[in-house]
């Protein structure tokens, strides 16, 4: 199996806390269910404009969104509620991680070992939660939402994704990193990390959603045999 080059200098867990992590997630506004019901979803096209649709939508010819009355609306609403629960659980883990990191810095001796073990447990739980969310493929096969991961966790996850793609002879996948709208200075840290630290052309923005990267495996990508 080919092993693609890992980033040359990934940030440590400590320096990555605020990288698409605690700062971004804790500051992210909670989704109000009443707002969710009126939201236009960019993830699926309006049923009227699908191949089997009439081509005429009461919202206008430019409508490419789900809206009330569509067969998939309720399913999408249910998904958004579940996703918000997932986001909140990741938020809490990052808050717990920040607290554990602070306590570890003050601890000594045996207590320091206990605090380190607790911090490691919380840190690894973040990665487990993101994988758990993606396993049922809520957005389709080979679509991975990596919001909330730190750079080292993401680097490990990308290697797992690549291995799965190679085993299944799949050449493309989508990785949702977000646009950095809720990050400090609106900096898309995870997106930048993947685009700059992996072989050129391996990750490119989706032309329909700049918060999603297209992961493509090609023979030209640098790899270690």
Image (spheres, rainbow, N blue to C red):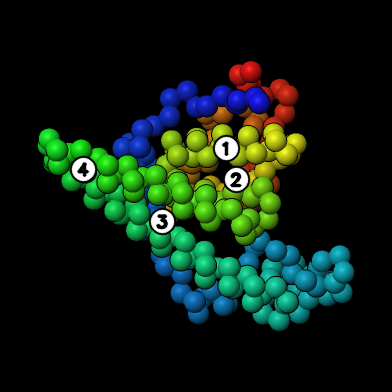
Find numbered disc 4 in the image and state the secondary structure of the residue it sits on.
Answer: helix
Find numbered disc 3 in the image and state the secondary structure of the residue it sits on.
Answer: helix
Which residue does the numbered mark 1 point to in the structure image?
A: 160
Mark 3 to mark 2 CA distance (whole Å)? 18 Å
The residue carrying pointer 4 sits among few (fewer than 14), some (14 to 19) or many (20 or more) residues within 10 Å by Cα, namely some
Mark 4 to mark 2 CA distance (whole Å)? 35 Å
Name the disc covering residue 175, or none. 2
Percent of width and height locating residue 199 = 60, 26
Q: Earlier in the sequence, mark 1 or mark 2?
A: 1
Do labels 4 and 2 touch, CB within 8 Å?
A: no
Residue at 17% x, 39% y: name it: 112
Do labels 1 and 2 touch, CB within 8 Å?
A: no
Of tags 1 and 4, the one toward the viewer is 4
Percent of width and height locating residue 119 = 28, 44
Name the disc covering residue 90, or none. 3
Q: Which of marks 3 and 2 is nearer the N terminus?
A: 3
Mark 3 to mark 1 CA distance (whole Å)? 21 Å
Percent of width and height locating residue 148 = 44, 50
Percent of width and height locating residue 122 = 34, 48
Residue 3 can be seen in this image = yes
């Amino acid at each position: 199996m080919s092993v693609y080059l890992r980033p040359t200098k990934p940030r440590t867990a400590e320096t990555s806390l605020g990288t698409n992590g605690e700062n971004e997630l804790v500051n992210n506004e909670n989704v109000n269910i009443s707002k969710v019901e009126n939201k236009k979803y960019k993830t699926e096209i309006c049923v009227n404009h699908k191949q089997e649709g009439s081509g005429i939508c009461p919202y206008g010819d430019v409508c490419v969104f789900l809206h009330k009355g569509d067969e998939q609306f309720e399913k999408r609403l249910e998904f958004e509620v579940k996703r918000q629960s997932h986001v909140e659980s990741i938020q809490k883990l990052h808050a717990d991680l920040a607290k554990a990191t602070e306590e570890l810095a003050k601890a000594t001796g045996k207590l320091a070992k206990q605090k380190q073990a607790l911090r490691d447990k919380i840190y690894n739980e973040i990665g487990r939660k993101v994988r758990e969310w993606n396993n049922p493929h809520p957005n389709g096969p080979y679509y991975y939402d990596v919001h909330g991961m730190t750079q080292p966790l993401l680097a490990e996850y990308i290697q797992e994704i690549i291995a799965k793609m190679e085993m299944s002879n799949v050449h493309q996948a989508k990785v949702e990193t977000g646009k950095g709208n809720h990050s400090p200075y609106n900096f898309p840290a995870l997106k930048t990390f993947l685009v700059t630290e992996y072989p050129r052309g391996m990750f490119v923005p989706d032309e329909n959603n700049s918060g999603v990267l297209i992961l493509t495996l090609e023979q030209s990508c640098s790899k270690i045999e």
